Amino acid sequence: MRIEISGLTKSFKGKGLALDGLDLLVPTGMFGLLGANGAGKTTLMRILAGLLRQTAGEVRIGGHDVTTRAGRLAVQRVLGYLPQDLGVYPDLSAREFLDYIGLLKGIDDRATRRRRVGELLEVVALTADADRRLRGYSGGMRRRVGIAQALLADPRLLIVDEPTAGLDPEERIRFRTLLSQLAGERTVLLSTHIVDDIAQTCRELAVLAKGRLVFRGTVDDLTRRADRRVWSVVTAGPAPTAGTVVSALPADGGLRYRVVAPGPPAPDAEPLPPTLEDGYLALAQAG
Amino acid sequence: MRPIDLWRYEVRRAGWAALLTPPVATAALVLISLFDSSPTADRNLVAALEMALPLATGIGAASLVGRDPAAELQLTMPTAYRSTLLRRLVVTLGWAALLAVLVVGILVATDSWPQSRGIASGQLVWLAPTLCLGGLGFLAGAAFRSPAAAGGLISTVWIVQQVFSGLVQDNYWTRLLYLFATTRGAVPDDWTANRLTLMATALAFGAVGWLVLGRAERLLRGEAE
Amino acid sequence: MTAAFRYEFLMQVRKRSMWIANGVVVLLLGLLSARGREVGDLLHDPDAKATVTSVAVAINLILPVVYGCFLADRLVRDDKLGVAAILDVTPSSGAGRLAGKYLGACAAAAVPLAIVYFGFVALYAATSGRPVAFAWAAAVFAVVIAPAVLFVGAFALVVPLLIPAPLFRVLFVGYWFWGNAITPDAMPTLASSLVTPVGSYPLQELFGYRGPAGDTELAGPAPGAVFNFLRPEATPATAWLSVGVLLALAILVLSAAPALRARTTR
């Protein structure tokens, strides 16, 4: 299910442009959307999910024009959406919540719906806690309920906004694996500011900054942006000021800094192979 | 017609507030009448039907928009969120109706139903003001997206009509919109026209509310801050 | 406490929905009164005290309903949003914060009320040439309107910790009408007593108000009425007692807040 975006602009009253003339093509499969907070990722997700109307531009999802009510409805029928702030009904159990969402998604047959809910609870490993109220669930468990509800109607398009925020490392890995397994014939749009999530799951990505597209390509392409720009510097003195410090770890002789910079930030700097995060920072430096 | 399971969930969404409020409001008035030794004491159940129940329903309807934690998710469902809200309104109105029928039953059984009203057409005693305030609550909720503001508006309409009863009724057109024409009506002959006007107004409020709820972006924005 | 006051006041006073709701109410009242009595008559009435008092009564009967509804879920929402937990670990005292929050919320609620009231008083003073109206208005505001605001504020903040906010709103509105506007001879009521929030005792004994027609006993025992033990003889002394009773009840209700919040946030 392809997503074709052209000239997409969204402005909010009194808050300026959230999206500014965005052109983007999202193919089937796992696709990452990276950007800082306020870059416009959530606004884009919401327009695709039919929550917001664009100020200008065209958006076609699977051939449907989401400007029209009919187009939006057609997309919502095949959409699974996991918002950044997933609100749930604390008085319902996970099973009841999914049952309710199933009804809202049009799965009217009780037997089909209950079977589907049971299957998905297995997929997200929540069967044991399925009849506990959501009020007592941890953040990670709620996220898993969130992905389960998104999958209820076997969607062809999954839009997942900051899915791993607040999760512990084990849950984050489990989540990523699950998302990767789901991609297959679906389009999964993963929006996040956590670079590692994309590095571990996506082949292609786009980077947004201040409502504009600043990169579109493969993970490898973005990583290569930091070729010969990643350095290791060990010093007991102040942190290097040239470039961006990625990390600072204790080492013999002070702190070992990992720095992204166009040239060596210190005379004894050692070059390092780049990661996706380095590539992202190099892109930010250039832009 | 959506399955009964969906309606069961919407009853739960309406919550304790919607469930408790109409009976407690009605009971409060009945409690006062138990202390009342005056000859008009038996009017209090009729007053409960015409005053307490519509107020409770109006505020219940006003509380439907703006306190849904899963609103963002709801707005992406193939089932339109405004249909869901309408379903919750129907639950609120339906519960009030159930209670009203119970109270009417008690009044008829104890021979306290007002002689001047037939039992069938007499249902307009509670139905008209309940639908009117329910519809207004729905519209106010849609417009303000704040149970506090919408509830405040319903409360104000109610109390202004109570306190300034004479003023509201001294003009034919405003008299047609008087909520308490049965218990405090100044011109009994206008009762039927009054009830029908209230119901028509209810429909109008509901229709405008439905239109206002059509914009997802407004509902996503939350309270009219 | 001042920080909590300032924060709460600013937050409430900025709510556009509150201003719109108040605006609609004032419009309703204005339309009604424009038809009920020639506004021109009122604006040229030479009796400044009576004029500002009668307007205060109308405002005090209706506008508290609006802010009572608004304040109804303040404390509950804070607890739901988890703000309370963050604030509880700050060095400021819980009681001080609660007092600040309470006073801030009441002050914010009083702002539209004050604007409407003193706005009218200014208009009246200008058209009738009676600037003494401001002095009377200030007195009425301090002795009658402010205690009502504080009384309503306390209940509106605390009771929704026990019952759902919509249920509180319904019971509050019903109570407001029953406890203020219904005469004791019509049915059992708390109106015309020491605990009448609209201020029957001070209105009558301190400002000489005796109803729209000027001939009603607003305060004092009503023959054969229930709750007459709350209606001592109306004198200036009992008028002040009434103000004190309302404020004392407000403080009593507020003192239950910490215990109720601990219950709900557990």
Image (tube, rainbow, N blue to C red):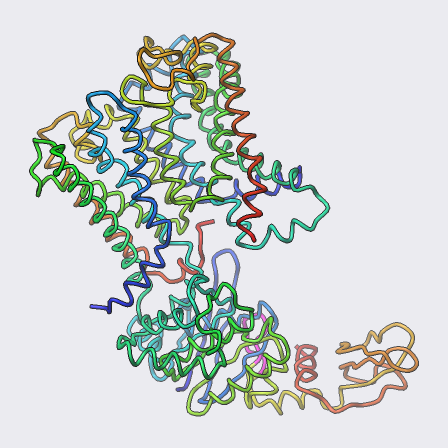
Which residue is more in the foreground, C158 or A223? C158
Q: Residue at x 40, y 52 (%)?
A: B145
Q: Residue at x 48, y 10 (%)?
A: C206
Decide whether residue B172 is among the magenta residues: no
Predominant SS along the magenta part: strand
Compared with residue A130, is residue A1 higher up or lower down, i.e. above or below? below
Compared with residue C225, is residue B33 higher up or lower down, i.e. above or below? below
Q: Residue C129, percent across and down?
A: 45, 11
Which residue is more in the foreground, A4 or B57? B57
Which residue is more in the foreground, C78 or A109? A109
Q: Residue A196, percent across and down?
A: 63, 82
Compared with residue B162, is residue A5 higher up or lower down, i.e. above or below? below
Q: Quadrant of the C terminus of chain A?
A: bottom right
Residue A236 occupies quadrant: bottom right
Q: Residue A200, percent across and down?
A: 60, 87
Compared with residue B29, is residue C76 higher up or lower down, i.e. above or below? below
Q: Which residues are drawn in magenta? A: A207-215
Q: Is residue A220 left or right of residue A157?
A: right
Number of numbered discs visible in the structure rendering: 0
Q: Quadrant of the N terminus of chain A?
A: bottom left
Q: Residue B151, percent across and down?
A: 37, 43
Residue B118 occupies quadrant: top left
Q: Is residue C67 left or right of residue B120?
A: right
